[in-house]
Image (cartoon, helix red, strand yellow):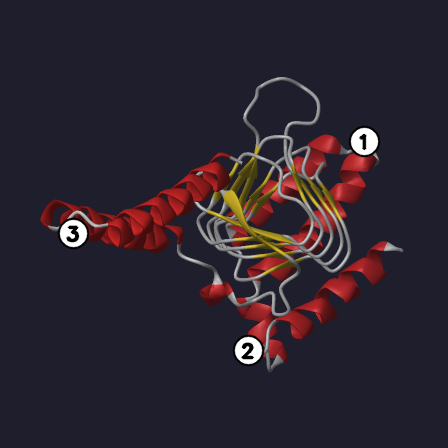
Amino acid sequence: MGLYSEIKEDFSNAYKNDPALNSKLNFLFNYPGVWAMVWYRVANRLYNANFKRLSRVLMGLNQIITNIDIHPAARIGKRVFIDHGTGVVIGETSIIEDDVLIYQGVTLGGVSLTHGKRHPTIRCGAVLGAGCKILGNIIIGEYAKIGANSVVVKEVPDNATAIGIPAHVIEKGRCKDQLMHNMLPDINKEMFEYMLKRVAVLEHILVEDNKEVLERDLELEKIYESFITAMKN
């Protein structure tokens, strides 16, 4: 696909991914993520043609205007949409496949100063929630979903949801609606609920030593062990 066709597709993709876009004037002034992709397309062509200094200058100007930092050597596929975009950082050896949705504040960064592949690979259809940090040469699987503000340092399989610091896979299976971040489970809440129930059981044991309470305590212990095992994976 030629440069013009890729840019045209980026423009039409914005209308597909954002229901708030209802006018060309709005598009012109309020979609820095789309304009950052346009400048990246040009700079990437220049970088691959060995005009590396010019490409870096172009992306430097883009960063000043859009507040989005994309290295021109990064490999970005078709129909990648950066929504709002402020604070997005995409490192030099990052690979982003087709139809990826990226929200503001996302970082695709490295954890090493060595040369070679040191940034993440994002497979097609993945959704990267606002403020999430994906660090190192890891793979985020196809149609995976990363919760807002998560820090991902391990690979996430296809069709999985990962949240937390550090991020853990808490659900497998492709989500029908990629925007429903409000449906992600709250690990901290579940842990506190467990602790409150456990304290209540122990209080009952102190008051009356009976078999039923002890059985409930054993059940909670199994739940706790399963939770710890899941957090370690």
Residue drawn 67% across the image and 19% down it: 115
Q: Nearer the viewer, residue 191 or 26?
A: 191
Query: Residue 123 at what x, y percent from top left?
Result: 72, 47
Q: Is disc 1 placed on a helix, strand or loop? A: loop
Residue beneath disc 2: 20
Q: Quick one: quadrant of the C terminus?
A: top right
The answer to whether residue 74 is left or right of residue 148 is right
Q: CA distance from mark 2 to mark 1?
A: 39 Å
Residue beneath disc 3: 204
Residue beneath disc 1: 50
Please identify the residue farthest to the top as the structure is shown. Answer: 114
- Decide which of tag 2 and tag 1 comes sooner along the chain: 2
Q: Is disc 2 placed on a helix, strand or loop? A: loop
Which is in the foreground here, disc 2 or disc 1?
A: 2
Q: CA distance from mark 3 to mark 1?
A: 73 Å
Residue drawn 64% across the image and 34% down it: 138
Q: Is disc 3 placed on a helix, strand or loop? A: helix
Residue drawn 68% across the image and 73% down it: 16
Which is in the foreground here, disc 3 or disc 2?
A: 3
What kind of residue is marked 3?
A: His
Local packing at callout 2 (Cα closer than 10 Å; few below 14, some 14-19, many 20+) is few
Which is in the foreground here, disc 3 or disc 1?
A: 3
What kind of residue is marked 1?
A: Asn
Residue drawn 65% across the image and 43% down it: 58
From this view, report whether residue 225 is shown above or below residue 41.
above
